[in-house]
């Protein structure tokens, strides 16, 4: 009771109760009572301009209910209360914290993100049990040196502040595993950082760093390093010796050269898009045995080396917006799930093949290696045997390219002779685009054991027949520029479908059946009347990389869409929603998703 003496004149408790009613009105007594039992108190989003005194003193003073009713049951003995270990006061209007912080020495989690703090009290040094401290989205200009006393700290989140430097002794935080310093004003990283030997994740993105210290390689356990959006012109060669590194983000810098990653045997993702890299050589690739994602978009690459085939684990390769005029045919031997080539002056691959997507490009490149088409004499013989009625059918395309092509004929029906011409040949692609078809020809089902690509664009289809749903090897389907407003539930049976193009139709919602096709990687549904998407169902589509919703009727974008972290391309232009604003959309998919995530109600 000695701590209460002198809090007020004659009756110390009476005086303190008055103060509590005055300053703690925004904290319900029931919440405080529950916190004494659980050791956790969440006061986020309560419009607080200061932390009520009753919060700091929750484990010091006699509870108000004890003063009102001293006949406690065994479960309500306040003197057996639990010390507060977790305090969340985020999303308020706090401009400062008092030294009363020291009255909560048992805290292991302190979350004060999204306030208006310009500094932290020196008393923070006394929170020696603290393991997680989140002060992100505030106005901190400096950190107190006392923060280096928090030797048990594992997670420190300082993103979106105004920090220009790191306090001396920071390396004493030897248990730190996750450190986020993104979106500050840092110009240098102290060499002493190397002593943070437990660090697993380090985020330095969106600062003003012109270089990284060579000593950074001393972080032997570091798995995830994010240096996106800085002013880096070079990367220290020592970075190549970081054996634990799995994810490396260097996008939006001023890099002209890539380092050689001689020891980074575990590196799974390398993101170096939006730099000024002019050359990719064998020396950059030969050590990347585990690489799954290689992002080289928006650079100045003129070519891709044949040694790209060394990256046998590669799943996603982004080469868009470079100066590449040709691709090595050996690229077709990789098992890529996603290949982006837009914005290159490619002369060796036709645009229509690129538009069909990754698998078609790889198939084309493989065909250039093998060149396994029949000899010229075979073709001549087959053509000579062609019946007069089949003269309109491109038999050469059937035999050599494995394509059944009857496009741009403006016909309302596909003649039987087209299907008859297939005979015993293998067909992998069907192109019936640019006709006047009102329904899908029923005989397409005859190709169900072999067809992977179907193009029915620029027709007059108002419904999808069940015959199409039986083509279970289908990976690509183009249905753009038709009159469709729904898809049949039976499309769920297309268990290999990766890309579907539904642009320029009449859809008002994203068809429900698409959420149930887990293999989908690309959904193009621009220029429709889509008014809503379901972010919860979208999140279950773990392979979805590209979603084009441009020019639809979306009045709002659900914040939960930000949880779809696998999306690499999310296109939302041309919709009537107000937020995110155009400035956010221009920053690209990662920025849009982060913006949305920050707005998910807690």
Image (cartoon, rainbow, N blue to C red):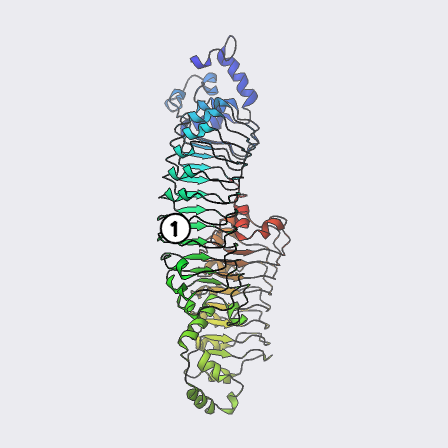
Q: Establish if 427 lies above or below 230.
A: below
Whether 534 is drawn above or below 348: the answer is above
Q: Is residue 85 visible?
A: no
| Image label count | 1
> Does any portion of residue 328 appear in the rendered image?
yes
Image vertical order of residue 143 relative to residue 338, above or below: above
The front one of 218 and 200 is 218
Residue 593 location, x and y as percent? 52, 49
- Label 1, residues with CA under 10 Å away: few <14, some 14-19, many ≥20: some
Q: Quadrant of residue 570?
A: bottom right
Q: Quadrant of the N terminus?
A: top left
Q: Secondary structure at mark 1?
A: helix
Left/right placement of residue 461 relative to residue 367 reads right
Horizontally, residue 527 falls left or right of residue 569, namely right
Q: Camera-side residue: 72 or 434?
A: 434
Give me the residue at 44% from left, 19% from top.
Answer: 60
Q: In screen coordinates, is 570 left or right of 127? A: right
Residue at 43% x, 48% y is 236
Q: Residue at x 50, y 28 (%)?
A: 120
In this rendering, position of residue 525 left or right of residue 292: right
Residue 7: x, y in percent? 50, 13
Residue 396's place in the image compared with 86, above or below, is below
| Residue annotated with mark 1 | 240
422 or 224, nearer to the observer: 224
């Amino acid at each position: 009771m000695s701590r209460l003496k002198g809090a007020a004149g004659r009756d110390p408790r009476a005086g303190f109760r008055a103060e509590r009613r005055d300053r703690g009105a925004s904290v319900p007594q029931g919440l405080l009572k529950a916190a004494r039992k659980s050791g956790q108190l969440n006061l986020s989003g309560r419009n607080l301009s200061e932390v009520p005194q009753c919060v700091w003193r929750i484990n010091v003073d006699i509870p108000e209910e004890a003063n009102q009713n001293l006949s406690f049951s065994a479960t309500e003995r306040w003197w057996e209360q639990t010390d507060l270990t977790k305090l969340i006061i985020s999303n308020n209007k706090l401009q400062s914290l008092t030294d009363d912080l020291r009255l909560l020495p048992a805290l292991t989690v302190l979350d004060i993100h999204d306030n208006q703090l310009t500094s932290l009290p020196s008393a923070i040094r006394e929170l020696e049990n603290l393991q997680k401290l989140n002060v992100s989205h505030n106005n901190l200009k400096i950190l107190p040196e006392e923060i280096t006393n928090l030797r048990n700290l594992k997670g420190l989140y300082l993103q979106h502040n105004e920090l220009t430097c790191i306090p001396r002794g920071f390396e004493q935080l030897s248990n730190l595993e996750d450190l986020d310093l993104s979106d500050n004003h840092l110009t240098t990283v102290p060499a002493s950082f190397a002593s943070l030997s437990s660090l697993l994740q380090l985020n330095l993105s969106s600062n003003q760093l012109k270089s990284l210290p060579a000593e950074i390689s001393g972080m032997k356990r570091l798995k995830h390093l994010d240096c996106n959006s800085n002013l880096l012109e070079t990367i220290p060669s020592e970075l190549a010796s970081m054996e634990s590194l799995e994810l490396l983000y260097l996008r939006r810098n001023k890099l002209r050269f890539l380092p050689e990653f001689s020891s980074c045997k575990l590196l799974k993702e390398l993101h170096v898009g939006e730099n000024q890299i002019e050359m990719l050589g064998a020396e950059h690739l030969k050590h990347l045995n585990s690489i799954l994602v290689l992002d080289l978009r928006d650079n100045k690459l003129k070519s891709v080396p044949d040694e790209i085939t060394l990256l046998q684990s590669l799943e996603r390769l982004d080469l868009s917006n470079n100066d590449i005029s040709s691709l090595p045919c050996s690229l077709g031997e990789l098992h890529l799930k996603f290949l982006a080539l837009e914005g290159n002056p490619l002369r060796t691959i036709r645009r229509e093949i690129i538009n069909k997507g990754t698998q078609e490009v790889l198939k084309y490149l493989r065909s250039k290696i093998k060149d396994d088409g029949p000899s010229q004499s075979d073709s001549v013989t087959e053509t000579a045997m062609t019946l007069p009625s089949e003269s309109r059918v491109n038999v050469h395309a059937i035999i050599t390219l494995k394509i059944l092509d009857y496009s741009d004929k403006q016909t309302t029906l596909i003649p039987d002779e087209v299907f008859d011409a297939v005979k015993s040949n293998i067909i992998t692609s069907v192109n019936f685009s640019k006709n006047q078809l009102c329904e899908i020809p029923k005989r397409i089902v005859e190709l169900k054991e072999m067809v992977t690509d179907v193009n029915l664009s620029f027709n007059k289809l108002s419904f999808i027949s069940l015959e199409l749903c039986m083509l279970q090897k289908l990976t690509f389907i183009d249905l753009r520029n038709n009159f469709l407003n729904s898809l049949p539930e039976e499309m769920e049976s297309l268990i290999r479908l990766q890309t579907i193009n539904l642009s320029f139709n009449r859809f008002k919602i994203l068809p429900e059946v698409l959420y149930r096709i887990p293999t989908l990687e690309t959904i193009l549904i621009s220029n429709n009347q889509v008014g809503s998407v379901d972010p919860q169902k979208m999140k279950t589509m773990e392979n979805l990389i590209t979603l084009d919703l441009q020019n639809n009727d979306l009045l709002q974008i659900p914040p939960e869409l930000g949880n779809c972290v696998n999306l690499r391309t999310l296109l939302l232009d041309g919709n009537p929603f107000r937020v995110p604003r155009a400035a956010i959309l221009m920053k690209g998919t990662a920025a849009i998703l982060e913006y949305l995530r920050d707005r998910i109600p807690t």
